[in-house]
């Protein structure tokens, strides 16, 4: 029990629930009857329920003499992984549609996608993928693409979505990035402004139109310095930035 708590970072109650549910499901399948498992007196207690002559009768299942614990342990570990994966996905859901700087780990030409390592606010690193289709055509041209997305390069991405998935039966987080969203110039400009110590607490930034690789139209509610705008355009591979001031923005 303690080993599972330490290994997966779950509470004792969470670990116990996974163990009891997993053991109950496996035993029910093995014995072809409904079996419940509870934790009592410092050990697992299993009870089987079978229908005999129209009545349900219960019987104790001897877990101590039972074989197959290695299989059960592997299934428990897989289910623990699923719980952890699901909770991580839920915890990071509110990071969708934010800016993430990522380091290019791999360029998979066959699968037509990039593997990117991003670091979340809690310091946890995630492996994400950015399909070629999520990159602007101006950045996919021969010569430009190889330079921008070389292994080890760091680029700004829009965190599109995160979901738990099963990959060959193993729980994994699937994180999708892109460089085409209107949110990217919005969040990138705001980050660049903060890096220049420009006050953004009362700043409104809205990208209402983006022609990827061409021009991005952004409305702000007050004047902003030029350098952050140029840095945003540079990261977007020279995409022009048209900034409009609308002091009535809400």
Image (cartoon, rainbow, N blue to C red):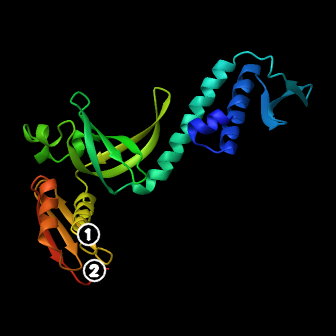
Where is residue 109? Give x, y as percent: 21, 30
Tell me the residue at 61%/43% (across/down): 10
Marks 1 and 2: in contact by CB < 8 Å?
Answer: yes
- Quick check: 194 left or right of 89? left
Q: Which mark is residue 219?
A: none
Front residue of 50 and 40: 40
Return the x and y of residue 197 as percentages of the image width and height. Answer: 24, 70
Residue located beneath label 1 in the image: 206
> Disc 2 marks which residue?
249
Residue 166 horizontal side relative to residue 230, left or right: right
Residue 82's x, y, as percent?
Answer: 55, 37
Q: Nearer the viewer, residue 235 or 197?
A: 197
Q: Earlier in the sequence, mark 2 or mark 1?
A: 1
Q: Quick one: label 2, few (<14), some, or many (20+) residues within 10 Å?
A: few
Q: Please provide percent x and percent y for residue 37.
A: 78, 33
220 up-or-down from 174: above or below = below
């Amino acid at each position: 029990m303690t080993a599972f708590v330490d290994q997966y970072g779950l509470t004792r109650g969470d670990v116990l629930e996974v163990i009891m549910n997993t053991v109950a499901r496996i035993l029910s399948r093995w014995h072809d009857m409904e079996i419940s498992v509870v934790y009592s007196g410092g050990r697992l207690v299993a009870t089987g329920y079978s229908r005999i002559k129209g009545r349900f009768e219960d019987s104790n299942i001897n877990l101590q003499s039972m074989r197959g614990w290695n299989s059960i342990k592997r299934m428990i570990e897989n289910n623990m992984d699923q719980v952890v994966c699901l909770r991580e996905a839920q915890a990071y859901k509110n990071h969708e549609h934010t800016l993430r700087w990522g380091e290019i780990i791999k360029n998979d030409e066959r699968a037509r996608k990039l593997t990117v390592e991003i670091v979340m606010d809690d310091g946890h690193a995630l492996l994400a993928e950015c399909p070629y289709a999520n990159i602007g055509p101006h950045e996919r041209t021969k010569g430009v693409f190889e330079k921008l997305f070389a292994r080890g390069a760091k680029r700004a991405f829009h965190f599109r979505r995160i979901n738990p998935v099963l990959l060959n039966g193993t729980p994994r987080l699937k994180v999708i990035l892109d460089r085409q969203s209107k949110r990217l110039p919005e969040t990138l400009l705001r980050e660049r402004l903060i890096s220049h110590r420009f006050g953004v607490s009362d700043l409104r930034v809205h990208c209402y139109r983006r022609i990827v690789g061409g021009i991005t139209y952004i409305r702000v509610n007050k004047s902003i310095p030029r350098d952050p705008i140029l840095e945003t355009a540079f990261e977007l591979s020279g995409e022009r930035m048209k900034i409009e001031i609308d002091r009535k923005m809400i």
